[in-house]
Amino acid sequence: SQTIHQWPATLVQPVGSPLSLECTVEGTSNPNLYWYRQAAGRGLQLLFYSVGIGQISSEVPQNLSASRPQDRQFILSSKKLLLSDSGFYLCAWSPTGGGFYGYTFGSGTRLTVV
Amino acid sequence: AQSVTQPDIHITVSEGASLELRCNYSYGATPYLFWYVQSPGQGLQLLLKYFSGDTLVQGIKGFEAEFKRSQSSFNLRKPSVHWSDAAEYFCAVGAGTGGFKTIFGAGTRLFVKA
């Protein structure tokens, strides 16, 4: 069966520090991968999605970047964190061909920038 | 533009009572619709999805949803709520080419009282 792993679960980082969040998927090949951010009391905001290795689409201009160095690995990064980067970050995957099948989400990373 | 509206920020129901969570969408083509559930501090779990065909769809955990094109609605229902159903519920519509840009509503927090 397919599983998705996301880590770390929580992270407290100072303003101006770098960030690296990792997400891996097991049990499937060539998944579509997504990074969402969820602010307190709000819905989910799509940050990036990827349909293949090295293929990244950015939805929101911001302080963050994403990379997909391997088929089932998706990384969210920042060179210098801002206070506004605080939030709950969720990685998700869907089968090849699109998101119309629905997404499977990881358990999320709670990022607090101080 | 595509959008999803969940009119109720929070709802409180008694255990054993019926539940209906409202969702309205705006989408130009035939929509792909989803309901997800999120427990505190966790990722989202897909409850059910609608693509086409029967407008009443069954999901996991005893949930069902009815698609009404004339009302642009996709309301989630459960005949008898259990205390473990307390969570946040998100309605979503698959959007963009390939469904890579799923749009989520702001969520409805469900409280269950004994």
Image: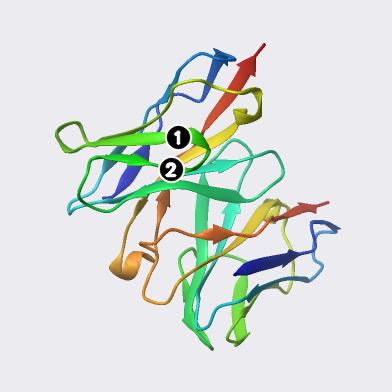
Disc 1 packing (10 Å; few <14; some 14–19; many ≥20): some
- The local secondary structure at tag 1 comes to loop
Question: Which label sits on residue B11?
Answer: none
Q: Position of residue A10 (x, y in %)?
A: 81, 55
User: Is residue A76 in view from this perspective?
Assistant: no
Quadrant showing the C terminus of chain B: top right
Separation of marks 2 and 1 at Cα, in angstroms: 5 Å
Q: Amino acid at mark 1?
A: Phe
Image position of B77 (left or right of B68)? right
The residue sitting at the left extreme is: B70
Q: Position of residue B51 (x, y in %)?
A: 27, 53
Residue at screen point 22% across, 44% down: B54
Residue placed most toward the observer, A63 or A89: A89
Whether residue B64 is situated above or below residue A53 in the rendered picture:
above
Q: Position of residue A88 (x, y in %)?
A: 67, 51
Q: Position of residue A54 (x, y in %)?
A: 53, 88
Whether residue A21 is situated above or below residue A70 in the rendered picture:
above
Image position of B7 (left or right of B37)? left
Q: Amino acid at mark 2?
A: Gly
| Marks 2 and 1 close (CB-CB < 8 Å) | yes
Question: Which residue corresponds to mark 2?
Answer: B59
Give a yes or no on whether discs 2 and 1 share a subunit: yes
Disc 2 packing (10 Å; few <14; some 14–19; many ≥20): some
- The local secondary structure at tag 2 comes to loop
Whether residue B7 is situated above or below residue B90 in the rendered picture:
above
Residue at screen point 49% across, 43% down: B60
- The colour scheme used here is rainbow
Question: Which residue corresponds to mark 1?
Answer: B63
Residue placed most toward the observer, B42 or A89: B42
